[in-house]
């Protein structure tokens, strides 16, 4: 009877309950650790694979982006060349027109038709400005250059 009483005593029951609970907690922790370590290994492998892919694809992607920008630049240059070609063709067509040629000769070369009188407007202050600018209005340009060289050799007083 004493053994039965011991078996049913509160202290014995609490002790057995504590042991069962501890065993249960220990089993669940060990399962979680196994699961956690397995997950960590998978995560490490996945991270390694992802890093390898990033490293393997980084250079080709950089080359791709660089080549795309080069292609875009070449297309812009080709478009500019086409526009310039079009402008030059238009200008060539204008120069084929005798009226345009005559207008350009009159405007830029001051050509006149027989019987026309041409006038040239002279700025009265132009000669004074020219003389004041270098101090030698009637002299040829090369004399002014040599004077500048001579002045550069003389020490300042």
Image: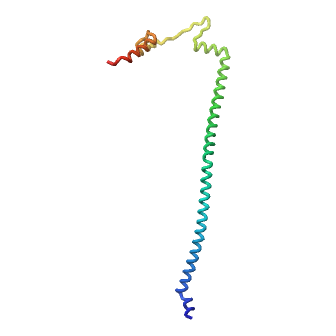
The answer to which quarter of the image holds residue 116 is top right
Q: Where does the N terminus fall, quadrant-wise?
A: bottom right
Q: Where does the C terminus fall, quadrant-wise?
A: top left
Q: Is residue 16 left or right of residue 151?
A: right
Residue at figure coordinates x 63%, y 33% from the top left: 76
Considering only vertical position in the picture, is 32 above or below 72?
below
Task: Report x, y in % for residue 123.
Answer: 48, 13
Task: Report x, y in % for residue 37.
Answer: 59, 65
* Camera-nearest residue between 72 and 56: 56
Residue at figure coordinates x 58%, y 68% from the top left: 33
Considering only vertical position in the picture, is 107 above or below 4?
above
* Camera-nearest residue between 4 and 72: 4
Q: Is residue 156 left or right of residue 13?
A: left
The answer to which quarter of the image holds residue 128 is top left
Colour mapping used in the image: rainbow
The answer to which quarter of the image holds residue 140 is top left
* Camera-nearest residue between 61 and 136: 61
Residue at figure coordinates x 60%, y 12% from the top left: 106
Task: Report x, y in % for residue 5.
Answer: 55, 91
Considering only vertical position in the picture, is 72 above or below 133?
below
Residue occupying the far top of the picture? 115
Task: Report x, y in % for residue 27.
Answer: 59, 74
């Amino acid at each position: 009877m004493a053994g039965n009483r011991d078996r049913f005593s509160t202290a014995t029951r609490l002790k057995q309950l504590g042991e069962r609970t501890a065993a249960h907690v220990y089993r669940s922790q060990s399962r979680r650790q196994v699961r956690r370590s397995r997950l960590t290994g998978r995560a490490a492998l996945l991270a390694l694979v992802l890093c390898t892919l990033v490293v393997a694809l980084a250079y080709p992607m950089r080359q791709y982006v660089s080549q795309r920008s080069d292609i875009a630049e070449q297309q812009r240059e080709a478009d500019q060349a086409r526009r310039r070609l079009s402008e030059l063709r238009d200008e060539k067509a204008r120069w084929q027109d005798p009226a345009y040629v005559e207008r350009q000769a009159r405007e830029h070369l001051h050509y006149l038709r027989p019987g026309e009188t041409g006038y040239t407007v002279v700025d009265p202050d132009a000669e004074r400005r020219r003389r004041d600018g270098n101090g030698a209005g009637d002299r040829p340009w090369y004399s002014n250059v040599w004077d500048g060289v001579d002045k550069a050799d003389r020490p300042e007083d």
